[in-house]
Amino acid sequence: MTQFIANQWLEGQGEAFQSIAPFENTPIWDGQYATPDQVNHAVTAAANAFPDWADLTLEQRLEYVLKYKAELEKNFEKISQIIAQETGKPLWEATMEADRMVAKVQLALDAHKERLAELTLAVGDAQGITRYKPHGPCAVLGPFNLPGHLPNGHIIPALLAGNTIVFKPSEKTPLIGEEMIRCWHNAGLPAGVVNLVHGAAEIGKALITHPDIVGVFFTGSYNVGRAINQLLADHPEKIVALEMGGNNPLIVHESADTKAAIYHTLLSAYITTGQRCTCARRLIVPQTAQGDQFIDQLAQHLPKMNIGAWNADPAPFFGPLIDIEAAQNMLKAQDQYIADGATPLVTMQQHEASPALLTPGLIDLTPLKTITDTEHFGPLLKVIRVPDFDAAIDAANATAYGLSAALLSDNPDNYKRFYRKIRAGIVNWNRQTTGASGRFPFGGCGKSGNNRPAGFFSADYCAFPVASLEANSISIPEKTIVGTGF
Ligand SMILES: NC(=O)C1=CN([C@@H]2O[C@H](COP(=O)(O)OP(=O)(O)OC[C@H]3O[C@@H](n4cnc5c(N)ncnc54)[C@H](O)[C@@H]3O)[C@@H](O)[C@H]2O)C=CC1
Ligand SMILES: O=C(O)CCC(=O)N[C@@H](CCC(=O)O)C(=O)O
């Protein structure tokens, strides 16, 4: 029983599929996709549940959300282990993800109170009030890379605001999606408030185009985000929040502590095997002696990193890619760069421990005439050498994406220039590009999103503002409008 509709666990009626643990390359879960009929059933359940759920006070909805939090805490180890094995990320990192799922409850509540606060103004002899209302039944589409934390970051604020949900996890991580929904079920949510359907693109399409779905909260790739936008072109009335990819730059310039610069580069480019939307893809370094030394030492350091199984002891820094196909695609991308004239500084290779495990790569794209603006979702960092700092900023901005960007530099004037010029939703100084805090907005410009940031600002797309003019009684004002006969 893998779909959850109106508080019933049901068998999917669509094609069978499995969740394959990437390191072991063995199935850890079997299930079926939903059918479009089942999607309809789930959306209808969410639509039926909406009026009563929306009618509850925030405090009443919060009671359920706090019970969900308690369920996450009760099942913390199991959740961490599922995230680790299903994605292949090390247990320490999966535990951090589970921690962030728990922490999201308080963050979303704080955000709700701050971002959706009632605002009152005197307007003549009436009171003007801004309040917020939920949209209705919303779809949440999740990615595979942080399969607990990221959908959780849409679902909690959406529920607090009074929406109901149909969640479709990534078809690569159905098990953690299911476990999360089990926690909601155990929290005692009324039937239909949260529903789960499994599937890939076809089920995603059926869900978001359903006429009763009024909001679509998506985290995933640019190509799919664009396809969603196209599919919904005739429905501007649906609220669509798209959190998409990045081709994020990291500039290193005038940073005397080479070791610290290497450490922050590793956390930028290779954490989660380079499978974070915020990962640095392009390492931009001016052609100075200090720049040469930094690149040399980084290249020497990469082979020293411990990589391996999610449960290995000692724990690795990163594990495999999500599947063998993803690993093969990364290797093909590297081959293509080399064929085009790039210089591999550290060649990314398949590791003997698992076909989905790749060693970290570093490749110098400076010799290329043109550098394609592509997000390669894996452990390959591309070096671009430039004449000076101004050229570094130009190179950093040479992308249609704009998610995260960072500068490692001891010189505050460099940061002032960088901050003013760079186009990105996350701009860091002497910190890695990844690891954004949930206390801040999380989203990017350009192809990275549609200006509806998640993180602390998720509250904004989970409700719409209503303007009211209110007075306890009606009266004729002293100054009336001409021509009305008063
Ligand atoms: N900006 C952000 O907050 C984040 C963005 N990402 C991006 O996500 C990508 C990696 O995640 P993936 O799971 O590979 O993303 P993906 O775009 O392939 O899939 C995301 C979700 O969309 C569904 N889907 C696929 N085709 C669809 C269609 N035509 N209509 C409706 N739904 C469809 C998938 O089944 C999945 O649930 C990277 O590009 C990464 O940068 C990942 C995490 C955070
Ligand atoms: O919503 C939040 O709590 C902040 C968003 C966040 O956690 N971002 C992570 C993951 C991004 C990704 O999925 O690639 C980060 O910045 O590393």
Image (cartoon, rainbow, N blue to C red):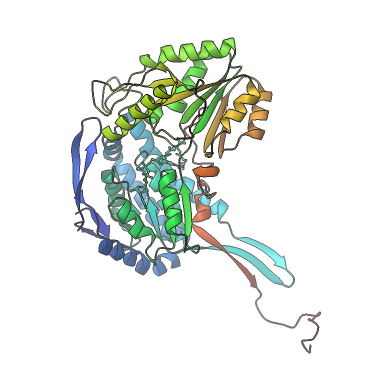
Q: Is residue 454 above or below residue 47?
A: above
Q: Is residue 323 visible?
A: no
Q: Position of residue 27 (x, y in %)?
A: 18, 39
Q: Residue at the spot x=37%, y=44% of the render?
A: 143
Q: Position of residue 134 (x, y in %)?
A: 48, 62
**Count of labels in the image:** 0
Q: Position of residue 52 (x, y in %)?
A: 40, 68
Query: Which quadrant is home to the C terminus?
Result: bottom right
**Quadrant field for ligand 2:** top left
Q: Is residue 150 left or right of residue 124?
A: left
Residue toward you, 196 or 371: 371
Q: Is residue 95 above or below residue 151?
A: above
Name the quadrant containing residue 146.
top left
Query: Which quadrant is home to the N terminus?
Result: bottom left
Q: Residue at the spot x=61%, y=34% of the render?
A: 422
Q: Is residue 360 above or below residue 405?
A: above
Looking at the image, the residue that sits furthest to the bottom is 485
Q: Residue at the spot x=75%, y=83% of the render?
A: 476
Q: Is residue 409 left or right of residue 307?
A: right
Q: Is residue 289 left or right of residue 209?
A: right
